[in-house]
Image (tube, rainbow, N blue to C red):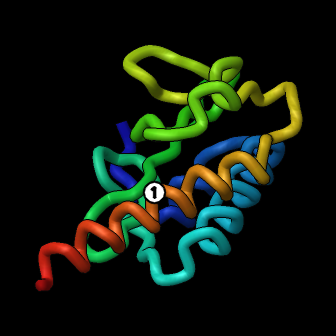
Amino acid sequence: MEQFQSIDDYVRSFPVDVQRALEDIRRTIKAAAPGAEEVISYNMPAFTLNGERIVYFAAYKKHIGMYPPPRAFKKETARYAGPKGSLRFPLDSPMPLDLIGRIVASQAKETTKRKARGAK
């Protein structure tokens, strides 16, 4: 299995249509969590904020998975529910970028709150 050094390397390893979906998600995450940093963790794209990973995403044959499971948005994410609370966004449907953005913004806000509580 190829070991990726960057999200760019990861994205380039997929067909063009999947690359587009991955880049759309990447841009959405950056917009929702402006201070987040890109990393590769467990050989998947991830974003960290305040030293904490706020989201992972990965492409598969028929979907893009998103981890960790959101703490909120249960009703809105029910149709995308995967195993162990992960989310699965089918590649044959438009990516729910608004929902992904709101989930990431929520994760970023929670991470920032935890950091602030720990700093006091």
Residue 73 appears in which quarter of the rendering? Answer: top right
Vertical placement of residue 6 versus 41, above or below: below
Quarter containing the N terminus: top left
Question: Which of the two residues, 107 or 42, is positioned nearer the viewer here?
Answer: 107
Asked whether residue 1 is in view, the answer is yes
Question: Which of the two residues, 28 or 92, is positioned nearer the viewer here?
Answer: 28
Residue at the top extreme? 83
Asked whether residue 5 is in view, the answer is no
Q: Position of residue 6 (x, y in %)?
A: 44, 66
The residue shown at (54%, 72%) is: 33
Label count reads 1
Q: Position of residue 88 (x, y in %)?
A: 61, 26
Disc 1 secondary structure class: helix
Estimate how packed mark 1 is, as few (under 14), some (14 to 19) or many (20 or more) residues with alpha carbons within 10 Å: many
Give the residue number, with chain letter if any, for mark 1. 107
The residue shown at (27%, 64%) is: 52
Question: Which of the two residues, 107 or 116, is positioned nearer the viewer here?
Answer: 116
Question: Which of the two residues, 118 or 56, is positioned nearer the viewer here?
Answer: 118
69 left or right of 59 in image = left
Q: Position of residue 70 (x, y in %)?
A: 48, 40
Residue 87 appears in which quarter of the rendering? Answer: top right
The residue shown at (44%, 70%) is: 38
Vertical placement of residue 59 versus 62, above or below: below
Vertical placement of residue 118 versus 91, above or below: below
Quarter containing the C terminus: bottom left
117 left or right of 70 in image = left
Residue 32 appears in which quarter of the rendering? Answer: bottom right
Q: Amino acid at mark 1?
A: Gln
The residue shown at (29%, 76%) is: 50
